[in-house]
Image (tube, helix red, strand yellow):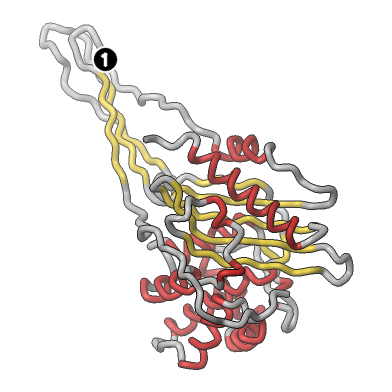
Amino acid sequence: MDRHRARGRRARPSRGKPLLYTAVASVVLVGATAAGTVYMKAQAHDGSGVVSSAASASPSASPADSEEASVEPVAEPSVDRDALLAKALKSVTLAAGAKTSVAVLDVDSGESAVHGDTAFDTASIVKVNILAALLLQAQDADRHLTAREKTYATAMIENSDNASATALWASIGRADGLDAANKRFGLTDTQGGDGELWGLTQTTAGDQLTLLRQVFGEDSELSAASRSYLQELMGEIETDQQWGVSAAGDGSGWALKNGWLARSTTGLWDINSIGRVSADGRDYLVATLSNGNSTQAKGISLVEAVSKAAVASFRDTAED
């Protein structure tokens, strides 16, 4: 499991712009003449990527025209994001025995893609989930975190301190408390680890993307204050832990949490990374999981390569 890193003076990573899930409406109009047909389609895009449409007709262009204008929906080309992601990942070489899964969301467009639905050990990325559960419980009790809880939270996220994670794991009610919070967060494929084994919580990349939506999106069970607190801690990760999904950004801003765990039964490494990155003025949420890595270094390289390919699959098709 991650070792506690002694805190010291370190360079603070730059932060990207605040994430805003803003509804965007577009209207497409195609000509209205006596000899033509009137088409109108209104589309509403929200942060979830859901598109709704409605069609309506305008009056006939000419009173002499005996035929009423017909109204039909305008067909627009659709993008299979999952297929594009799968294609992009073909450029990543997997070592024998290694497995990976990734989920990514383009915050600006609301579009997302997932590759793989296998469950992985969380290792220390579950620490974000533990703190989210603690904050949710505090909200329910209409209280602020105590000074001790804040001390634990800072060490757990910024330093990846395991003793602090164990203390807060007990505070939320271990797996039962995590699972109860995750039911409200919308995580359907995550199950807390047995006893004190929080690092063996099972999760999927898709569920981790859902968790990131709770941390960085406005449509969340967490209050604005709780989200801001978590985002701030994830933006202050110790220097030697600043790897993973951040490699997919351009350095203009990131917030992340990594996890690394050597399994005692096989000696192979679980390497995971989740967070928000900025690239070319756009924001992305990325969750990359892996296991079966022969070394920690090879696992980190794999996670970074997968994260880069995942974001590139969106950047290559992003509108100017």
Q: Quadrant of the C terminus?
A: top left
> Which residue is at 48% across, 40% downward?
315
Q: Residue furthest right?
A: 265
Q: Residue furthest left?
A: 63
Q: Is residue 92 left or right of residue 18?
A: right
> Which residue is at 60% across, 50% downward?
307
- Residue 25, compared with residue 12, is above or below; it is above
Instruction: Give how far across and how far down residue 100 sits, in percent.
Output: 71, 52
Kind of residue indicated by mark 1: Thr
Identify which residue, 154 or 206, lies in the foreground: 154
Q: Is disc 1 surrounded by few (<14), some (14 to 19) or many (20+) residues within 10 Å?
A: some
> Which residue is at 45% across, 48% downward?
279
- Residue 57, compared with residue 168, is above or below; it is above
Identify which residue, 35 or 98, lies in the foreground: 98
> What element does badge 1 sit on?
loop
Instruction: Give how far across and how far down residue 243 sits, in percent.
Output: 60, 61
- Residue 30, compared with residue 20, is above or below; it is above
Q: Quadrant of residue 130?
A: bottom right
Instruction: Give how far across and how far down residue 129 sits, in percent.
Output: 57, 72
Instruction: Give how far across and how far down residue 40 sits, in percent.
Output: 27, 27
Number of numbered discs on residues = 1
Residue placed under numbered mark 1 in the picture? 37
